[in-house]
Image (spheres, coloured by chain):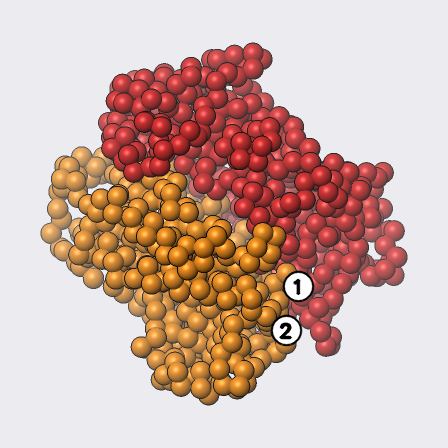
Chain colours: A red, B orange
């Protein structure tokens, strides 16, 4: 593993991340800052996007960052740069110190003083790192795509389909340091494969289904599982035309039971996490959970835990505090919201260590890796489908989530990439639907669930954090019309 | 538009830019030595930004940031390779070009979409600099903070403690972009952006419904201009206005659901009509290549009908223009070296154009079955030089109509809902089924406009545009800059310009947020 901030640069040797961090803290102190906290990052990544079986886009490269918070005369100011040389860094510090008198006096934020002994100073914190993945070899990425091509050939349903998707790999390091002599360093890798199958590309070019696998070890990408899941669903789409569930209906509003797969649930939970579990929103009264601490907010069969150390994350937050598991909802009862040190003090609760980077503090604090558990015997998707007694919508994925009413956590969005009606034992592909549902109410109507799946895409719009989610069977989910392709 | 045909060898800070030009030339040369048949390189020596944020009259953030980046795209053996980095030195440039060539080779072996060469006749040096009257970086931070503090103090004067969260933000950015390709096209473009926004959240008492309003626009209000753009707006008067509106909304009835006529103000329609709809006009979505990420377009399956398909009523005229003054999507060349353009996407309601690149022109013409597009629409843009360019909006201008705004309001029937600034937005991956929520709405009751809260509208976008009854005239036409349109993998943020006047529609489905 490289410890160098500027890998590959030999003409003018650059400092390692730790040396650079030490230098930043030292130079900022010498220029007049009383306290300093800094996060240095380096990431390299490559991606192969496939369209109809051919590589179409291939963004790749490396990036660096310094995110800095300074305290002078009891005032706090932040800034950042992406070119980590001495000139740029000194210019940034000089500018911040010249502007810090504009900031109000504050006793916040406090700097973390000590990290637990199990993570001493310079030791690298490896929660999810793999040497082979870190090599970011284009050939490894192409090999996985070729494997997928071969697997798809093995199933009757997918052997002659058109497919698109992507294979991504990333590796990087994060260093945290402050003027209390706290020094932390974390290295990580990530890899991800997804695939969209188009069973009728010429008659129904918009009909597709989806599967994915992500892991921090590229060799643990489960290509076989991806191909099998695609084959399972493609069989219900192949040679069929979708029906429009709202055709002929007088009202755009309707309720159906749903089976919502983890891929569909993840972006919705992401929004709930951002707005409802954010300690700052809770404090301001704009969260759907505001004022409900200790109260029942979901069904008694639901528990939501933030598990920040479970899968390839940074083990420390943006203030250098150690992350730990936190029960947000325990058997339906609200137990905690996410905080940084400032929000925790304002709430009068223990700090949950969810601080953003110094420049992002005004956005509040959010959980990093939500794990949703349902107190029931897990069922496979097939078993859940078999047990549907009423017409039920089976949703693979969701698109473009919004929260039109934050105070009630009402989310809306549309289904995509595999949506079916299960009715009297028959499975029929349908056009996409728009849902409009208050999510904590929906989580009070969960009937059963599948096993937890790691939903992880280091590059996707949901961000880098994985979710640990089961498929949920939810009663009376609300819909508001759907897509038509009539012109 | 400023076009200087003499290339300046210094940047805006007076540094010697020939260093970067030489680095680019050397890197391109190495790409060819390594077997690349074509290469184009972008380099951003330094992009700087300064942001100020104030909450409840206290500065919460004064942030300075700077970044540099470069990236190279190569064609080899029918494969395309790319690599980008934020370290601008010769050694790193060598690593970058080797990795890009290696990637092109690997992609070629797997099977790669055919690369398309640019117009080989386009060569020479071109320089563009944003015209501005007042450099926003020379305005003291204290002055910026005080403007926002005064606006927030005005909110408190109007609403007292009922205004429980007041916020304001101001941003200025300066980016220099250099581009060089194998055919000798060199461009040097410097962009300056300025923007500001204030917001207030009000409630009757703790635990009550929250009503939020923003000014001048909820999406950042940005222009390619200097600080004069900020000074032109009266933020204090705006603060008082939105606070009083938010207060009144706390006591206003919830909008009633149903199907009615609607007038949609620019603060909402620039997002719905000028932005979310127009994503469906992006060439990559229409080819299907974005189906697995950003989504597709309902045009995807009807491409041969371009030039005759009725998209909207005869009142609808939509233009893509990357040359309009102050547009955040204005430039001399896009990020693959195509010169800026002005063209219709919709003319008299008929779908006639798409946002294209040199790759999508070729792919689209195949789907259309004839050579409909002759050249790139110059809409390839990248967030930074280390990102790949994507098919993007430039400035999307919905042309004004002939009705005066007051005349439009007068002719609207009883029960018409007028929608103000945007609050929430979502649309499906065909760009058909949408839902937009707004901060404020009014209903026409006995000839006067009464406030309504928690309003949203939804429906099928094609039916919606065909129900357009007209646009207000140019007196109420407004150009906005959206600072943060997300697209791409990894996600890239882009500034897109949008102009419209109030728009008038029939048979709009109206719903209630949080009902």
Q: Is A232 displayed left or right of B45 in the figure?
A: right
Q: Is A443 displayed left or right of A124 in the figure?
A: right
Q: Using the numbered discs, state the Cα–Cα distance from disc 2 to disc 1 in whole angstroms.
A: 10 Å
Q: Residue at x 42, y 21 (%)?
A: A177
Q: Residue at x 48, y 27 (%)?
A: A319
| Label placed on residue B515 | 1
- Residue A83 showing in the rendered view: yes
Q: Quadrant of the C terminus of chain B?
A: bottom right
Q: Quadrant of the N terminus of chain B?
A: bottom left
Q: x and y percent of residue B321 in the render?
A: 32, 66
Q: Is A136 displayed left or right of A102 in the figure?
A: right
- Residue B43 showing in the rendered view: no
Q: Chain of mark 2?
A: B
> Mark 2 vs mark 1: which is more N-terminal?
2
Circle 2 — which element? loop
Compared with A484, A50 (above or below) is above
Task: Please say if the residues under marks 2 and 1 sit with CB atoms less than 8 Å apart.
Answer: yes
Q: x and y percent of residue A444 in the render?
A: 77, 49
Residue density around tag 2, few if under 14, some if 14–19, many if 20 or more, within 10 Å: few
Compared with A273, A11 (above or below) is above
Q: x and y percent of residue B194 in the render?
A: 29, 53
Q: Residue at x 58, y 61 (%)?
A: B428
Compared with A369, A72 (above or below) is above
| Label placed on residue B257 | 2
- Quarter of the image holding residue A348? top right
Report the front residue among A127 and B290.
A127
Q: Chain of mark 1?
A: B
Q: Residue at x 64, y 54 (%)?
A: A408
- Quarter of the image holding residue B120? bottom left
Q: x and y percent of residue A188 in the render?
A: 53, 26
Discs 2 and 1 lie in a common subunit: yes
Circle 1 — which element? loop
């Amino acid at each position: 593993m490289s410890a160098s901030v500027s890998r590959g640069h030999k003409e003018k040797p650059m400092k390692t991340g730790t040396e650079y961090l030490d230098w930043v803290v030292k130079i900022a102190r010498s220029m007049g800052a009383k306290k300093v906290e800094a996060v240095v990052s380096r990431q390299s990544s490559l991606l192969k996007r496939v369209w109809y079986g051919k590589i179409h886009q291939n963004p790749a490269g490396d990036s660096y960052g310094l995110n800095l918070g300074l305290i002078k005369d009891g005032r706090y100011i932040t800034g950042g740069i992406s070119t980590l040389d001495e000139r740029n860094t000194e210019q940034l510090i000089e500018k911040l110190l010249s502007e810090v008198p504009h900031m109000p006096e504050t006793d916040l934020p406090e700097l973390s003083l000590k990290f637990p002994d199990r993570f001493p100073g310079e030791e690298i914190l490896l929660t999810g790192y793999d040497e082979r993945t870190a090599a970011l070899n284009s050939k490894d990425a192409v090999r996985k795509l070729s494997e997928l091509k071969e697997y798809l050939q093995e199933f009757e349903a997918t052997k002659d389909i058109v497919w698109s998707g992507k294979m991504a790999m990333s590796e990087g390091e994060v260093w945290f340091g402050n003027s209390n002599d706290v020094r932390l360093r974390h290295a990580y890798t990530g890899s991800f494969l997804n695939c969209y199958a188009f069973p009728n590309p010429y008659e129904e070019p918009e009909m597709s289904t989806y599967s994915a696998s992500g892991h921090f070890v590229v060799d643990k990408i489960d290509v076989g599982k991806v191909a099998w899941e695609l084959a399972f669903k493609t069989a219900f789409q192949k040679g069929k035309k979708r029906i429009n569930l709202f055709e002929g209906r007088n009202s755009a509003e309707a309720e159906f039971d749903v089976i919502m797969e983890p891929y569909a649930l993840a972006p919705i939970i992401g929004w709930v996490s951002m707005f409802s579990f954010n300690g700052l929103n809770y404090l301001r009264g704009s969260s759907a959970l505001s004022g409900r601490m200790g109260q029942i907010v979901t069904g008694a069969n639901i528990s939501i835990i933030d598990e920040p150390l479970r899968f390839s994350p940074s083990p420390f937050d943006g203030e250098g505090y150690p992350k730990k598991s936190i029960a947000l909802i325990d058997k339906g009862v609200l137990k905690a919201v996410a905080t940084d040190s400032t929000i925790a003090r304002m709430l009068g609760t223990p700090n949950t260590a969810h601080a953003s980077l110094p420049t992002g503090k005004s956005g509040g604090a959010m959980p990093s890796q939500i794990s949703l558990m349902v107190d029931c015997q897990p069922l496979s998707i097939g078993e859940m489908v078999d047990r549907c007694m009423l017409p039920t919508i089976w949703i693979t994925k969701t698109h473009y989530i919004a929260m039109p009413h934050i105070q009630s956590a009402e989310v809306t969005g549309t289904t995509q990439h595999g949506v079916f009606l299960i009715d009297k034992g028959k499975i029929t592909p349908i056009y996409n639907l728009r849902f409009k549902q208050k999510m904590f109410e929906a989580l009070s109507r969960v009937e059963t669930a599948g096993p937890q799946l790691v939903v992880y895409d280091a590059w996707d719009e949901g961000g880098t954090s994985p979710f640990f989610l089961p498929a949920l069977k939810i009663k009376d989910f609300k819909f508001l019309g759907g897509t038509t392709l009539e012109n | 538009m400023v076009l200087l045909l003499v290339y300046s060898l210094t940047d805006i800070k007076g540094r010697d830019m020939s260093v970067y030009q030489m680095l680019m030339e050397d890197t391109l040369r190495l790409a060819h030595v390594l077997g690349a048949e074509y290469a184009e390189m972008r380099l951003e020596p330094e992009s700087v930004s300064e942001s100020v944020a104030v909450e409840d009259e206290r500065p919460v953030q004064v942030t300075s940031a700077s970044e540099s980046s470069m990236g190279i795209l190569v064609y080899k053996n029918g494969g395309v390779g790319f690599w980008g980095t934020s370290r601008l030195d010769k050694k790193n440039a060598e690593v970058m070009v080797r990795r890009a060539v290696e990637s092109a080779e690997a992609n070629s072996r797997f099977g790669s979409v055919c690369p398309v060469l640019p117009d080989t006749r386009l060569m020479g040096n071109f320089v563009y600099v944003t015209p501005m009257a007042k450099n926003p970086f020379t305005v003291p931070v204290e002055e910026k903070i005080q403007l926002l503090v005064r606006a927030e103090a005005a909110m408190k004067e109007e609403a007292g403690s009922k205004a429980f969260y007041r916020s304001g933000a101001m941003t200025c950015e300066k980016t220099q972009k250099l581009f060089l390709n194998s055919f000798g096209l060199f461009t040097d473009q410097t962009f300056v952006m300025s923007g500001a926004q204030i917001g207030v959240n009000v409630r009757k008492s703790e635990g009550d419904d929250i009503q939020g309003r923003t000014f001048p626009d909820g999406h950042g209000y940005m222009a390619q201009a200097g600080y004069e753009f900020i000074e032109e707006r009266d933020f204090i008067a705006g603060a008082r206005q939105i606070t009083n509106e938010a207060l009144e909304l706390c006591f206003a009835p919830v909008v009633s659901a149903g199907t009615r006529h609607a007038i949609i103000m620019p603060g909402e329609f620039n997002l719905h009509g000028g932005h979310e709809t127009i994503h469906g006009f992006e060439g990559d979505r229409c080819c299907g290549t974005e189906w697995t990420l950003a989504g597709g377009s309902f045009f995807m399956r009807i491409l041969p009908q371009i030039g005759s398909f009725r998209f909207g009523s005869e009142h609808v005229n939509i233009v893509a223009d990357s040359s309009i003054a102050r547009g955040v999507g204005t430039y001399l060349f896009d990020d693959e070296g195509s010169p800026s353009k002005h063209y219709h996407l919709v003319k008299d309601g008929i779908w006639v154009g798409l946002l294209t690149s040199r790759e999508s022109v070729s792919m689209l013409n195949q789907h259309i079955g004839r050579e409909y597009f002759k050249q790139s629409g110059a809409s390839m843009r990248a967030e930074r030089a280390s990102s790949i360019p994507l098919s993007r909006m430039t400035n999307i201008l919905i042309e004004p109509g002939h009705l005066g705004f007051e005349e439009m309001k007068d002719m609207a029937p009883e029960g018409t809902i007028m929608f103000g600034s945007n609050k929430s937005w979502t649309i499906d991956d065909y760009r058909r089924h949408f839902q937009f929520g707004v901060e404020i709405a009014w209903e026409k009751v006995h000839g006067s406009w009464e406030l309504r809260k928690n309003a949203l509208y939804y429906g099928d976008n094609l039916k919606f545009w065909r129900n357009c009854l007209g646009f207000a005239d140019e007196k109420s036409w407004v150009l906005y800059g959206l600072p943060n349109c997300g697209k791409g993998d990894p996600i890239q943020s882009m500034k897109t310009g949008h102009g419209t006047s109030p728009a008038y529609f029939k048979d709009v489905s109206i719903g209630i947020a949080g009902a």
